[in-house]
Amino acid sequence: MQPYYLFCLPHAGGSAMIYARWLETVDPAIKLVPLELPGRGTRFKDRPYASIGPLVEELHRKVSTYVAGGSDYALFGHSMGALLTYELARRIAAGGERMPRHLIVSGLKAPQLINRAWEPLSHLPDDELKARLAEMGGTPQAVMDNEELMQLFLPVIRADFRLLDEYAHEPKEKLAVPVTVLTGNQDRMTEAEMLAWRELTSGRFGLHTFPGGHFYLADQTREVSERINEALLGGRLQQWLWR
């Protein structure tokens, strides 16, 4: 039996290895494939991309290598990773290739809303950027307190934020893929901004809210994994909101 791949993309400045903890909670029928981005983790020495297009092309090549034999697959992304997931799915659709079985996006307003009143972050001075990172959470305090580590980290986070700051959504055909949206109930995004993902798919749509802020994933590993298992492997929970 061929594997069912779940390709996972991280938040801005994050390593895809944050998803390693899911190995114990995601159903064994799903094979996790964290996609590491340049400038972090095992790719620390690689230069981050200056624009989203070439990065999506690289991700497309990687995913294509895994699924060339016809395996089912799905895409997951948190925050900036959600945007990359969406653009990757559009790249696959543009090539007329076999689409993912599901898109699961987390912690980001719908892409068509990103360039509307978006708060630019990449240009902030170091002190202001650090303060914003502390407010968002997700960066270990030990890293925040280590000036040497922060000097290594800040160029990567700036490059990632620049992808978001300069992103401009181009209306195209809706994706013919089910889309599930996950969010924290204390995040800065509104429910309306998350529900707007529904405009981008002609497939089934679901929204689920978890306790917590932007990085609710860290505290809700088992609960998030249960929703992923449910979305990818079938069935329906009573509290799931399908629209």
Image (spheres, helix red, strand yellow):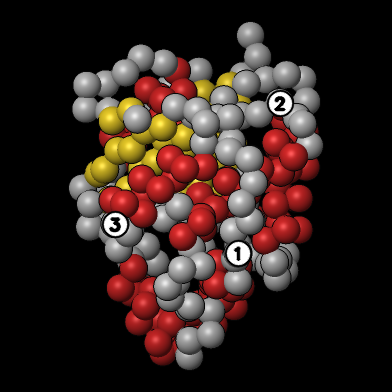
| Residue under the point 34% across and 68% down | 136
Camera-nearest residue between 51 and 200 = 200
Q: Is residue 80 left or right of residue 135?
A: right
How far apart are the two marked residues, 2 and 3, measured between alpha carbons? 33 Å
Vertical order, 122 against 211 (above or below): below
> Which circle marks residue 240 in the picture?
none
> Which circle marks residue 168 in the picture?
1
| Residue under the point 33% across and 74% down | 134
How many C-alpha atoms fall within 10 Å of the one at disc 1: few (<14), some, or many (≥20)?
A: some
Q: Determine whether the residue tagged by mark 2 lies in a helix, strand or loop.
A: loop
> Which circle marks residue 190 in the picture?
3
- Does label 3 or label 1 sit earlier along the sequence? 1
| Residue under the point 58% across and 38% down | 174
Q: Quadrant of residue 170?
A: bottom right
Q: Is residue 96 left or right of residue 44?
A: right
Residue 131 position within the rendered picture, expressed as x and y whole percent measured from the top left:
35, 82
Q: Which residue is mark 2?
A: 98
How many C-alpha atoms fall within 10 Å of the one at disc 2: few (<14), some, or many (≥20)?
A: some
